[in-house]
Amino acid sequence: MFRISQYMQEIAAPTPIGPTRKPPGPVVIWNLIRRCNLTCKHCYSISADKDFAGELSTAEVFRVMDDLKAFKVPCLILSGGEPLLRPDFFEIAKRSKELGFYTALSSNGTLIDAAMMKQIAPIDFDYVGISLDGLGATHDKFRRMEGAFAKSLAALRLCRAAGLKVGVRFTLTQDNFADLPGLLQLVEDEEIDRFYFSHLNYAGRGNKNRKDDAHHRMTRQAMDLLFETCWRYQQKGLKKEFTTGNNDADGVYLLHWVRRKFPQSPELAAHVEAKLKQWGGNASGVNVANIDNLGNVHPDTMWWHHTLGNVRERRFSEIWPDTSDPLMAGLKHSPRPVEGRCASCAYLAICNGNTRVRAEQVTGNPWAEDPGCYLTDGEIA
Ligand code: SF4
């Protein structure tokens, strides 16, 4: 996850460059259930409104949680499918809090009403993230459910009224780009704490057409808008988090934005660059892990076709450090054995070669250059 607001804060009030902090264990995104009441266009878990066989039982989830705790995992993101459809969901969430995990709920929001809030509020989630793919009709079309937007917005309001930290998760596509300014306005008007901008796992058409690629152009416009909005909030003293995911080239793009925006202060850009290096870019397989509904462990949520082991057969704490899997060995190696323009990129230390699954999907080689990089050759030189 790339935290734009953190760097805006650094521009406004630079802090000393300390040593790189290594989290004690990975953040675990846990898809507790595959069932979902919606069938969204861009769902990576290809969920459906039916029960899937073989999912982890409550006792198994608890056993894994104990192991995760001992392995010093700091944070569990409880996701799905729609996690609220799991009958034991609140037992799991309660236990997660009792064990001291930072506990986040990732939901489509359509099931969160006043009655459901009676169960959500006492858990005291550290964060509730709800997906919005646009405003009104756009969102309903993406979610293939009339009235989904109204329900999800109501859910955000209910969670916020209960004093929970809430965020909107938005995945950019050609079909919802036009809604982005309106959605940012909604986030401001509704006093929503966080805006999480997720890049679609888009591979593009490779290096040749990078400059002309419509999706890349749109991405750059969206990032410019996010940076400008976030900087405006920073200047107004509005506490709002802006984060992005699925494209670590965002860090490099931000650095170019800082250079353009503050040409008279090269030391500011140098400071931001040092802070970006401290962040270090993509963390799949290192500081981000995924457990699916069947207990399979993956380097992150986009790697469901690559299983490292199953928590029924082997503890997570044994699976995760095991680098006998070549993909895990490469992901954990620093620098990663990336090829093509990523290998020669001047900013590899910031981006860490971005999203390896895109390279693998397009070329079959997980170490090929990331085809989803939207930066021009000039910007990576
Ligand atoms: S070329 Fe590769 S390493 Fe450089 S910014 Fe793009 S994706 Fe990241």
Image: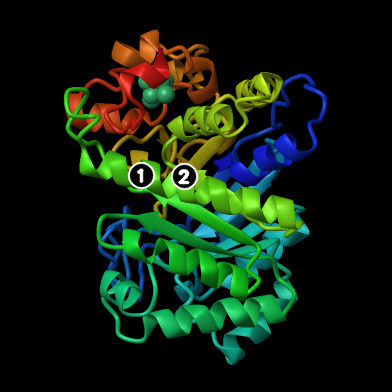
The residue to which callout 2 is attached is 224
Residue at far bottom of view: 115
Residue in the picture at 67% in, 56% down: 233
Could you tell me residue 151's position as x and y percent?
46, 84
Residue 31 visible to the viewer: yes
- In the picture, measured across the screen, residue 352 lies left or right of residue 68, that is left
Q: Check disc 1 and report its element: helix, strand or loop.
A: helix
| Residue in the picture at 24% in, 20% down | 365
On screen, residue 130 versus residue 211, left or right, reads right
Split into quadrants, the picture shows ligand 1 in the one at top left
- Type of amino acid under label 2: Asp
Q: Residues within 10 Å of mark 1 (few under 14, many from 20)?
A: many
Relative placement, left or right, of 144 versus 12 is left
Circle 1 sits on which residue? 219
Q: Quadrant of the C terminus?
A: top left
Residue 216: x, y in percent?
29, 39
> In the rendered image, which quarter is residue 135 located in?
bottom left
User: How many numbered marks appear?
Assistant: 2
Q: Is residue 188 above or below residue 333?
A: below
Q: Earlier in the sequence, mark 1 or mark 2?
A: 1
**Picture residue at 30% right of the left edge, 20% below the top:** 369
